[in-house]
Amino acid sequence: MKYSKSISSIRPMIIADIESVFGIEKVNSPSAWSLKQFSESLQCINVLTVNDAVIGFVSVLEAAGQAELQNISIHPDFHGLGYGELLLRDAIETLSSDTKQLYLEVRVSNFSAIRLYKKLGFKDVGNRKDYYATEFGREDAILMSLGVIS
């Protein structure tokens, strides 16, 4: 990893972070969450800051012994520096002790995310045909799962 632990921190998102998080989402995702979705998900989102500036976020929803990685995104200026891995590792490590499985969907074309998920132990468990909207039509999703040891 290339990040500097001395200048980065992960903390729960607060209302003041929503505009920054929304901006990161808009530049990275063709089907970005809305401001309302971020506001309604405040309690399950953590942000990653570098020098007090929000550069990424992760949203994980836990229920009934399972969790879903709903969204993870890093500002393009910080891609390839290990911040996505740092954020995802923290999300996994801070899951509640009764959570046994973490699931996610990822675009089949998102090679860097798929590589990261596999590096952290996620396994392919299925596909969802035409799951994501794109500017040219639809794109499949790969379903992935990670067994969590508490």
Image: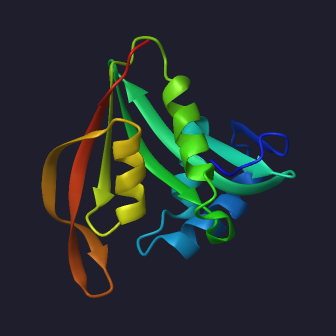
Residue shown at the point (36%, 65%) measured from the top left: 110
Q: Which sits in the foreground, 117 or 32?
A: 117
Counting every numbered tag in the picture gives 0
Question: Residue lying furthest bottom in this view?
Answer: 136
Residue shown at the point (34%, 55%) measured from the top left: 114
Residue shown at the point (44%, 35%) measured from the top left: 61
Answer whether residue 27 is visible to the viewer in this image.
Answer: yes
Q: Which sits in the foreground, 1 or 28?
A: 1
Residue 111 falls left or right of residue 37: left
Q: Which sits in the foreground, 101 or 110?
A: 110
* Residue 52 x %, y %: 86, 51
Q: Is residue 28 above or below residue 7?
A: below
* Residue 133 x %, y %: 28, 74
Q: Is residue 109 above or below residue 97?
A: below
Residue shown at the point (41%, 71%) measured from the top left: 31
Answer whether residue 41 is visible to the viewer in this image.
Answer: no
* Residue 92 x %, y %: 49, 30
Q: Is residue 89 above or below residue 3?
A: above
* Residue 94 x %, y %: 56, 24
Quadrant including the C terminus: top left
Question: Residue lying furthest front in this view?
Answer: 1
Residue 96 falls left or right of residue 77: left
Q: Quadrant of residue 91?
A: top right
Q: Quadrant of residue 135?
A: bottom left
